[in-house]
Image (cartoon, rainbow, N blue to C red):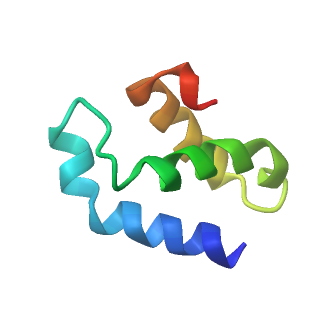
Amino acid sequence: MELLEMYCDLLLARFGLIQTQKELDPGLEEAIASLIWASPRLQTDCPEIKVIADQLTIKYGKEYR
């Protein structure tokens, strides 16, 4: 869970980059893929993670699901 929290902090810090670029930045790929992967497993403990994962899936495609 701590690792996912660090990934969320990273995405928050790079939010401007996420908004402006259409392609996935290689430095964010692991964080985004991990959040999307963990979402179904943690959504009962943290329902917000599903919303974040859904938005990232819409932006970057289903290959990260």
Q: Position of residue 17 (x, y in %)?
A: 19, 51
Q: Position of residue 26 (x, y in %)?
A: 33, 47
- Most extreme residue toward the top is 62
* Viewer-side residue, 32 vs 15: 32
- Most extreme residue toward the bottom is 2
The tally of labels here is 0
Q: Which quarter of the rendering shows the C terminus?
A: top right
Query: Image check: 30 left or right of 47?
Result: left
Query: Image check: 62 left or right of 19?
Result: right
Q: Position of residue 5 (x, y in %)?
A: 58, 73
Q: Position of residue 51 (x, y in %)?
A: 58, 42
On screen, residue 8 above or below 54: below
- Asked where in the image residue 16 lies, by quadrant, the reply is bottom left
- Asked where in the image residue 23 lies, by quadrant, the reply is top left
- Most extreme residue toward the left is 20
Q: Residue at x 77, y 50 (%)?
A: 43
On screen, residue 54 above or below 50: above
Query: Image check: 52 left or right of 18?
Result: right
Q: Residue at x 15, y 40 (%)?
A: 20
* Viewer-side residue, 44 vs 4: 4
Q: Residue at x 72, y 72 (%)?
A: 1
